[in-house]
Amino acid sequence: MSEIILGSKMVQLIIALILVSTFLILGSTRLYSCVRAFGIQSFLLACVAGIVAYSTGKNDIYIVALLTLVIKAAVIPYIFIYIIREIKVKREVELYVNVSPSLIIGGVLVVISYYLIRSINILSELSSFALSASMSLVSIGLFVMISRKKAIMQMLGILIMENGLFLGAISLTYGMPLLVELGIFFDVLIGVLIMGILIFRINKTFESIDTDMLKTLIG
Amino acid sequence: MIEYLLLAPILTSILCFLTKTRKQVETVSIIGSIATLVLGLVLVNNVFKYGTIVAWQNALFADAFSAFIVLIVSIVGFVASFYSVGYMGHEFDHNIFDIKKLKMYYVLFHIFMFTMLLVGVTNNLGLWIAIEMTTLVSALLMILYSRKSSVEAAWKYMIICTVGITFALFGTILTYYAAVKILGETGDALNWTSLIAVADQFDPTIMKLAFIFILIGYGTKAGLAPMHTWLPDAHSEAPTPVSALLSGVLLNCAMYGIIRFYTIATKSTGVGFTSNLIIIFGLLSLGIAVPFIILQEDYKRLLAYSSVEHMGIVALGIGFGGVYGIFGAILHMFNHAMTKSLMFFGAGNVLLKYETKEIDKVSGIVKSMPVTGPMLIIGALAITGSPPFSIFLSEFTILAAGFLQGRYVSSVLFLLFLIMIFAGFFNNISKMVFGTPKPGITKGEVSRWTLAAMSILIVFVIVLGVYIPPFFYDMIMKVVAVIR
């Protein structure tokens, strides 16, 4: 059962590290460091998937772990770096909410997620640990999207949310059936590419990627 | 069978990519969409005659409800491809689109068709994948015009819908979790058929949580308030034929996702919880649409807000439940698809002629465009639910269901909102349709293609208002049986 695997201290440690990497994103003001932290987060996620695959002996999950490693920890960070380099933006994050309040809000979100998941009392202790981490990632991702000015950070926020869901899926049910999992990877990758195209287009049309500019359509 | 239906738009899209001239790309697109329509109709016929079809090791599947969605997608898609020839041709003639962009438009158009058909025929919660794909493709269609406002709309659309759909994924994972506990870890545990069979044993706590996430997630995509904020931007900034597909078809596809989960969740949580939630979102959508419709200055946005309203009505029908409620909701999905596409096509003709989207700057359409004008009047009457047009029937059925189920407060509010929307909408449209056209506007229609597309739709709007053919009635009853 999932309890035994998640019980292994290893997975708990990695999940804790995933949370740390999320706070690295909240705490940094440079775009490159954010992308790097996201890469680390995805790498750790691939490790979780790898361990789950090893202990259940399911080949499907190995494939998922490998795909996470390749797509989320390598290809997507590379696309980010490519975009940042090509559009020559200032390498700073530009915040609506400063670093220290951001970190505090992040902490509060983790606590809320923890108690929210705890309140579902049919879950075992350990899957509720993983699920509350997953919930935290989702809410922090959402917070990153609304508290950062650059369009590129909104894209990163969505990917953090997606990572959170991946963690939830792998800890609750060893991930989804392979076909569905592959489809999700496909969508995430295409989604990142298309958001990249949109960011280039925003940059070309508005000569900036501040989402402040995108406020004309109302009513 | 299902494979061929999915293959047709993909093939068309590839062929469109290979063409060289405007004439070629248009011919390929028209032939492709006729093929898609024919295959779609054959599928629908087979499903309603012989029952559920599965293919591709159970990954694809079509029951009555899927077939109904396929029917809507293929009819509106077919008509929109006709309309595109006129509309995009006009943009091409006026050098707004070059041949590269025109080709790109048709390539994406047919991929968009493919993704929407896929939503209907996926046999599992992997529905999520198909719905996310529709967002990706349609965002690309939106930025074909490189106006500032289009780029802004596309970005908002992409971001808000992706976040929404992420919530839906969470709901899907929870549903899968509930299913795995009963069914074990098989690949089948995500199939509709296996889910429905055991849905009553699912843990209600988890299913409640799952349904909330699904409703918020797919509700974002379906344009239910208060998650609708992207919709008026996206639907008004997209090229007109795409606006029609977005409003008429894509919203229904997202609604389809909600209704599928509604069926599963209701079996586990009991009907009270799910219905109340859907009714709240439905009423909210109607209510929010009212002021925006009354005070609207942009006629494409007017139509977009009217879509928010109509998705609210469909949600209400499902929420009221019972045979009447669901029958009304399904009929309304069809009627809204036809009528809203008709209205968007009309609005597109007006946009080409007057080159403005502001209501105040347009007048005398009846005089300047003798065919589009009357059709717009009929469309506006129909969309606001006046008899004897099709939407009146479905709205009336839903209202009756509300009273039958004892939902008096919701039903009265529903009626009130409808009256206010009727007044606001018609006031705005009549400003545009009547009066004398401004000097400089020549008399005449923009293109015959666009008129052909509109006349196909208007047949549905008028005929279904006075007479529901027995086979169509049977079809909807079969869909109702799937949902209940």
Image (cartoon, rainbow, N blue to C red):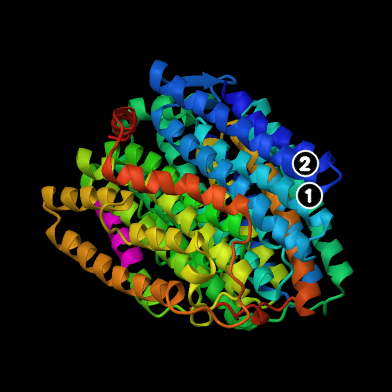
Decide if residue B6 is on the left or right side of residue B72.
right
Q: Position of residue B177 (x, y in %)?
A: 45, 37
Q: Are marks 1 and 2 in contact (CB under 8 Å)?
A: yes
Residue B336 shows up from this direction = yes
Image height of B392 relative to B266, above or below: below
Q: What crowding class fits label 2: few (fewer than 14 Cα within 10 Å), some (14-19), or many (20 or more)? A: many
Q: Which mark is residue B16?
A: 2
Is B398 positioned to the left or the right of A135 in the image?
Answer: left
Tag 2, which secondary structure? helix
**Which residue has dot 1 on it?**
B103
Magenta stretch: helix, strand or loop mostly:
helix
Please indicate, yes or no, whether residue B258 appears anywhere in the rendered image: no
Which chain's residue wears label 1?
B
Q: Position of residue A123 (x, y in %)?
A: 40, 44
Q: Earlier in the sequence, mark 1 or mark 2?
A: 2
Q: Amino acid at mark 2?
A: Cys
Question: Distance from label 1 to label 2 (Cα)?
Answer: 6 Å
Mark 1: few/some/many CA within 10 Å (<14, 14-19, 20+): many
